[in-house]
């Protein structure tokens, strides 16, 4: 089965071909303190070159596997933002 990811709690899908990476370099150890960003770099990487940490930082969350009882001939697959659901047709 294909690996699927959810972003902003939307219905899971495969990763896009490229992922936008944003790196921040902080001044004088002031990490996570507003107003102290010295440099921000933005660039795109092919998804296969991204680390799991970069994928997560870009907002993509690994979706769980489909429910075992899901049968597309008799069910509709639903998504509540973090989990799959199965409904009869």
Image (spheres, grey):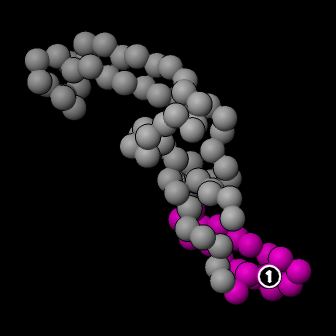
Q: What residue is pinned by disc 1?
A: 71
Q: Is residue 77 above or below residue 35?
A: below
x, y percent for residue 72: 83, 77
Which quarter shows the N terminus? bottom right
Name the image quarter holding residue 4: bottom right
x, y percent for residue 17: 66, 35
**Residue for point 48% across, 42% down:** 55
Secondary element type, mark 1: loop
Q: Is residue 65 above or below residue 62?
A: below
Magenta span covers which residues? Answer: 69-89
**Residue for point 86% across, 84% down:** 74
Which quarter shows the C terminus? bottom right
Q: Is residue 55 left or right of residue 73?
A: left
Q: Residue furthest left?
A: 28
Q: Is residue 72 left or right of residue 27?
A: right
x, y percent for residue 41: 40, 16
Q: Is residue 16 above or below residue 79?
A: above
Local crowd size for mark 1, using a 10 Å CA cut-off: few (<14), some (14–19), many (≥20): some
Q: Residue furthest front?
A: 49
Name the image quarter holding residue 23: top left
Magenta highlight on residue 8: no
Magenta highlight on residue 74: yes
């Amino acid at each position: 089965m294909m690996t699927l990811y959810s972003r902003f709690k939307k219905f899971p899908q495969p990763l896009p071909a490229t992922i936008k990476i944003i790196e921040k370099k902080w001044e004088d150890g002031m990490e996570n303190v507003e107003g102290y960003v010295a440099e921000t770099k933005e660039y795109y990487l092919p998804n296969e070159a991204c680390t799991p940490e970069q994928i997560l930082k870009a907002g993509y969350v690994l979706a769980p596997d489909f429910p075992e009882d899901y049968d597309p001939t008799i069910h509709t697959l639903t998504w509540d933002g973090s989990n799959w659901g199965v409904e009869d047709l």
